[in-house]
Image (cartoon, helix red, strand yellow):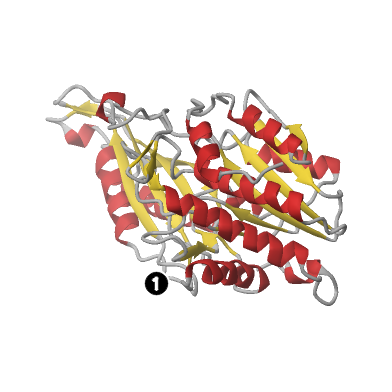
Amino acid sequence: MTQIDPVDLSARLIRCPTVTPAEGEALQLLEALLTSGGFECHRVDRNGIANLFARWGPKGALRTFGFNGHTDVVPVGDAAAWTHDPFGGQIVDGQLWGRGATDMKTGVAAFVAAAVDFAQQASPSDAAIILTITGDEEGIGADGTRAILDWMEATGERMDVCLVGEPTCPERLGDMIKIGRRGALMARITATGVQGHSAYPHRAKNPLTALVRLLDGLASHELDKGTAHFDPTTLAITTIDTGNTADNVIPARAVAKVNIRYNDAHSSASLDAWLRSEAARMTAETGISFEIALDVWGESFVTQPGPLVELVAAAIKAETGLMPELSTTGGTSDARFVRGHCPVVEFGLVGKTMHQVDERIEVAQIVGLKAIYGRILRDYLAKAAPAGGAKAMTGRG
């Protein structure tokens, strides 16, 4: 089997219309390619979401390196505003254009190409590669990577370490590794009072007044000053709604939502307790009752600098000459699920145009990313295991 061109594979994947939750034949394409490259493949679909698990090498090998990624993409928005067809996969002026060109069909193509090439060129008997690819990262994620990890747990499959191929670099390929992510939650705060005429406010209990006071206190409170690997926790008020269409009526009910991005000084449980404590204090002052419901998107986590981080950083330095910054910035990713299975880091392309109209990436970056991924595999799998076995380098952070 000839070496896989990651640029051509990226273009073919972009031509698959895979707006979440559509599979668009992307995983079918990858499964056929990986099977022909010697990988054992399993579809792990759940509740209409398409997922793919692929392993090369023996189950339970001494050293198993994992990659994780997704083929689903966000909607294109106004297709007429695009310079080139968002599902055309065209190469123009040295750049590959299309939805998924940065987030993250190119990342998937790069690690698939690197993995298949490694499998063809090297055959250490004690090594394995596992690829987990989902069609549900841009959605709620309940039946994507989670489903694959559930299936792996049930079937005895295991990764020792994992690299998520999300775009992580702000300016140049190689300038940043994500070693963790902030936690993220949305709190829905419902304030209930007594409806009344606005000319007779003493006969009503205005939930908006109490809610606004509560929100001001939440937003102005400093939760922390940051931690060793994280910026300070942030809270943003994202909506306030009463559904009130009458200008002379005090409403009985008002709802607000706040979005909290939190570091490892907090958990969703501790923040829930804080929100409820503040709401109880406001109830005592105003008589307005509050209900709070949380939607937790992911807890904060960090993979402490150590063997895995050093392995990835060394490969980046060897291929690009850059020593990457270690970061925990950005939103959520499927690393939040993988971190419960094994140590995980994220590294991928420059993400400047992800989710934008005219999403695109330099072709040279895709080639460079495959080279970095290939070096990581060689350094982890093809070299002699460290004392105590390769699993000695996977200590959790």
Outermost residue toward the front in this view:
2
Furthest toward the bottom, the residue is 387
Q: Is residue 45 above or below residue 210?
A: above
**Is residue 231 found left or right of 79 in the rendered image?**
right
Rendered view: 130 above or below 270: above
Residue in view at x 32 percent, y 47 percent: 237
Task: Locate residue 86, reporting x and y percent.
Answer: 38, 30
Q: Where is residue 382 shown, x and y percent of the image?
A: 76, 64
Q: Residue furthest left?
A: 199
Rendered image quadrant of residue 163: bottom right
Dot 1 falls on a residue whose secondary structure is loop
Any part of residue 295 in sight: no
- The answer to whether residue 23 is above or below residue 340 is above
Residue in view at x 55 percent, y 51 percent: 165
Against 239, residue 23 (above or below) is: above
Q: Nearer the viewer, residue 244 or 23?
A: 23
Nearer to me, 371 or 174: 371
Residue 162 lies in what quarter of the image? bottom right
Q: Nearer the viewer, residue 156 or 63?
A: 63
Identity of the amino acid at label 1? Answer: Lys
Quarter of the image with the N terminus in it = top right
Say whether residue 329 is visible: yes
Give the percent coordinates (x, y) of residue 132: 67, 43
Circle 1 sits on which residue? 225
Residue pictured at 44% horizontal, 60% vertical: 173
Locate residue 157, reporting x and y percent: 81, 47
Closer to us: 203 or 374: 374
Residue 209 left/right relative to 235: left
